[in-house]
């Protein structure tokens, strides 16, 4: 699988009274006006229409406490369009914010490194087939019991609207999605565990990547559930292929999809 480099991108927009006021493109338009002294040339350099450029300026002037751009007519040297000192101060402050924003983005960008390392080559979700066997309806949410194809029973919590929109009832078939990071594993007897959802599995494969380990766990019907654990946990449990493990996860960590999806 080809290595994919992910990056985080974002731009600053300043709004006034819930309307667009300053944006990178609008600041660039103001800079172009300073450079060319002409709205037509400034708009052309930004690849927008003359009409759009004036619409932006008129909106900024309307929302601002002081004029952003003023038209100067006639006189020595002819007329033109000028960016006010107040607008130049706004532009300066906006660029300061952009620099701070970019610095923060670079910090956040490092949080995406896990996306393009080897540990993400497998899906982060396990998909299991199930049948609804009981629906306990509450005001806004429903607690449901699900029978997997492996004949084990698990519980999930879903919004009541999900039940209604998909016309689900006891006997309906659904897909169960479980994120690998929400699955923990244990060699303890299930009676010693408090977690509601426990599946009996056998270790089919072990994928080690730096300080993370992805376990591919096989159910009795050969369906696979993925568990992503730390290397420290993997080492502590001394996990090997063919080991029998309990896959453990909370009811709220399950996402249901109707079979129509």
Image (spheres, grey):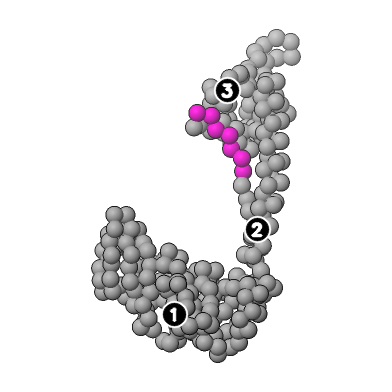
* Residue farthest to the front, as pictured: 192
* Residue farthest to the bottom, as pictured: 242
Label disc, if present, on residue 191 of the rendered structure: 1
Q: Earlier in the sequence, mark 3 or mark 2?
A: 3
How many numbered circles does the render carry?
A: 3
Residue at the image point whose x is 26% and y is 74% from the top:
171
Is residue 12 in the magenta section?
Answer: yes
Instruction: Tell us which disc is closer to us: 3 or 2.
Output: 2
The segment highlighted magenta reads: 11-17
Label disc, if present, on residue 64 of the rendered structure: 3
Label disc, if present, on residue 111 of the rendered structure: 2
Is residue 40 visible in the rendered structure shown here? yes
Residue at the image point whose x is 52% and y is 87% from the top:
244
Q: Position of residue 152 (x, y in %)?
A: 37, 81
Left or right of 158 on screen, residue 77: right
Kindly report the distance in space between the C-alpha atoms of the residues bearing marks 1 and 2: 38 Å
Q: Earlier in the sequence, mark 3 or mark 1?
A: 3
Kindly report the distance in space between the C-alpha atoms of the residues bearing marks 3 and 1: 67 Å
Q: Earlier in the sequence, mark 1 or mark 2?
A: 2
70 or 85, nearer to the observer: 85
Instruction: Specify the quadrant of the image occupied by residue 23.
Output: top right
Q: Position of residue 209 (x, y in %)?
A: 67, 75
Q: Quadrant of the N terminus?
A: bottom right
Secondary element at tag 2: helix
Residue at the image point whose x is 57% and y is 79% from the top:
215
Left or right of 97 on screen, residue 48: left
| Disc 2 packing (10 Å; few <14; some 14–19; many ≥20) | few
Instruction: Tell us which disc is closer to us: 1 or 2.
Output: 1
């Amino acid at each position: 699988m080809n290595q994919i480099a992910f990056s985080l991108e974002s731009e600053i927009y300043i709004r006034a009274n819930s309307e667009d006021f300053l944006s990178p493109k609008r600041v660039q338009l103001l800079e172009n006006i300073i450079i060319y002294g002409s709205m037509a040339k400034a708009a052309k350099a930004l690849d927008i229409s003359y009409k759009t450029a004036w619409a932006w300026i008129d909106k900024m002037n309307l929302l601002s406490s002081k004029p952003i751009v003023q038209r100067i007519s006639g006189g020595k040297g002819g007329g033109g369009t000028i960016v006010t000192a107040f607008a130049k101060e706004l532009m300066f402050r906006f660029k300061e914010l952009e620099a701070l924003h970019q610095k923060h983005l670079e910090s956040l960008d490092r949080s995406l490194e896990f996306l393009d390392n080897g540990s993400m080559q497998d899906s982060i979700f396990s998909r299991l087939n199930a049948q609804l066997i009981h629906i306990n309806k509450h005001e806004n949410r429903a607690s449901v019991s699900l029978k997997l194809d492996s004949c084990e029973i698990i519980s999930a919590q879903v919004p009541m609207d999900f039940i209604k929109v998909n016309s689900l009832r006891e006997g309906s078939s659904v897909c169960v999605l479980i994120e690998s990071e929400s699955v923990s594993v244990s060699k303890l007897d299930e009676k010693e565990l408090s977690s509601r959802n426990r599946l009996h599995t056998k270790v089919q494969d072990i994928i080690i990547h730096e300080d993370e380990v992805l376990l591919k766990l096989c159910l009795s019907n050969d369906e696979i559930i993925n568990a992503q654990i730390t290397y420290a946990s993997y080492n502590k449990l001394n996990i090997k292929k063919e080991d029998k493990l309990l896959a453990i996860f909370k009811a709220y960590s399950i996402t249901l999809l109707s079979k129509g999806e």
